[in-house]
Image: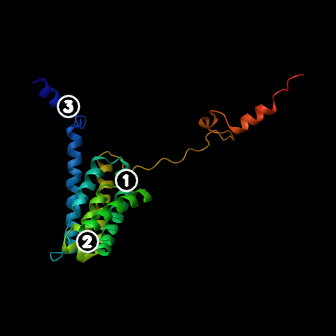
Amino acid sequence: MSKVFRSLSWAKRLVPDLTHISPLEQLRVCSGLLTGILTVGFIGAGFLGSSGDLPLLSAPLGASAIILFALPASPLAQPWSLLGGNVVSAAIGVTCAKCLGEPLLAATFAGTVAVAAMFVLRCLHPPGGALALMAVLGGPAIKAAGYGFVLWPVALGSLILLAMGVLFNNLTGRRYPHLTKPPSSNLHKTTDPAPLQRIGFRSDDLDVSSDQVVPARA
């Protein structure tokens, strides 16, 4: 029996502690998701009409919405990460689908190359990996659309979601976007090196000390 209790205690440690998220904050996040996804869907309906073959919504945009409204301070939620990560990944997915043919091979390369490209372009956004796979495995309508899938629902949908994120987060007391800090400037207006650069020995210090050594008398 003790082993059972120890196992249950260990299993509880796998569940993340989200108790610090207040009910009001949970309501704010859910309201943002509702507003953002509904807006993308309504505009998509007007953009595609009733005869469009492409989906009104892209499923990975739901994951983008969670990151955008629940974690607006995260580097993964910033505008370039969201827009660049989604668009670049979708374009890579379409390219792999056209060039490689075999779905499993194309999907594998699409996901891998998309993540590598997001690293290089500094726009890492996890839903981008799903969009790369969706461009390969999303069905006949998406394959037929080709790079049109990158335009809608990915690029325009991401732009609409991003605009709603800026509006909703700031109206509900969450600053967005978060700008990167500028490089530290010379606050003291001197030519002295920064404090951390003064720590330790340099080759110049050893040269100076060796020049100042007094030769021993015979």
Examine the rendering and report whether any part of residue 131 can be seen. yes
Amino acid type for the residue under numbered disc 1: Gln
Residue 11, quarter of the rendered image: top left
Q: Which residue is mark 2?
A: 102
Residue named by callout 1: 78
For this orientation, the residue located farthest to the front is: 218
Q: CA distance from mark 2 to mark 3?
A: 43 Å
Instruction: Inspect the image, locate mark 2, and give the three-letter code of the amino acid beneath it.
Output: Glu
Q: Quadrant of the C terminus?
A: top right
Residue extending farthest left: 1
**Residue 10: assigned label:** 3
Task: Give coordinates of residue 51: x percent, y percent.
Answer: 15, 77
Residue 56 vertical position relative to residue 73 in the rendered view, above or below: below
User: Of discs 1 and 2, which sits in the foreground?
Assistant: 2
Alpha-carbon span between mark 1 and mark 2: 34 Å
In percent of width and height, residue 66 lies at 25, 51
Q: Is residue 31 left or right of residue 85?
A: left
